[in-house]
Amino acid sequence: MPYQLNFEKFLTYDVGGEGIGLDVEIRFGDSKVNLNVKIDTGATYNIFERKFGAELGLEIESGMRQRFGTATGVFYGYGFRVTVITAGLEFDSMVFFAEDDNFGRNVLGRIGWLDKVILGMVDYEGKLYLSHYLDE
């Protein structure tokens, strides 16, 4: 039995690149930052480089401190509620900015992004389909 989904947005990404990259805007108050991120279905939260939080004017250590464990080790980040905009889709989300200045990854994870979208993809063609997830 076939199933059909309808999506609000269609994006493409470079299948030869590392990961599935998206352009994202994050806002806090009147400040905003644009950056390229990777979709990471294994990440629990959205985690960004510390410098982007600083660019938003955040006092990083004033956020909610959280410990993160990965296959390669442990790191800490500080959480803030911000607005995340992807392909024109806007979400209020908890995001974390890394404690370490040398943290060099920016990922969209399950809580605060994947739980807010309906996501479809055809990886071998670099096609990404997105819609708001509306819990009705």
Image (tube, rainbow, N blue to C red):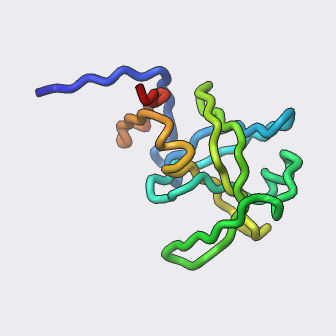
Q: Residue furthest left?
A: 1
In this picture, residue 51 sits left or right of residue 131: right
Residue 70 visible in this rendered orientation of the protein: yes
Vertical comparison of 41 with 74: above or below: above
Residue at 54%, 77% in the rendered image = 72
Q: Position of residue 119 (x, y in %)?
A: 42, 36
Residue 130 visible in this rendered orientation of the protein: no
Q: How many marks?
A: 0
Residue at 35%, 37% in the rendered image = 122
In this picture, residue 115 sits left or right of residue 84: left
Residue at 49%, 32% in the rendered image = 12
Q: Position of residue 90 (x, y in %)?
A: 62, 29
Q: Nearer the viewer, residue 136 or 114?
A: 136
Question: Which quadrant would the N terminus be assigned to in this image?
Answer: top left
Q: Residue furthest bottom?
A: 73
> Which quarter of the picture shows residue 102?
bottom right
Q: Nearer the viewer, residue 62 or 72?
A: 62
Vertical comparison of 103 with 124: above or below: below
Question: Which quadrant would the C terminus be assigned to in this image?
Answer: top left
> Which quarter of the picture shows residue 97?
bottom right
Vertical comparison of 33 with 132: above or below: below
Residue at 76%, 70% in the rendered image = 100
Q: Position of residue 68 (x, y in %)?
A: 59, 69
In this picture, residue 125 sits left or right of residue 108: left
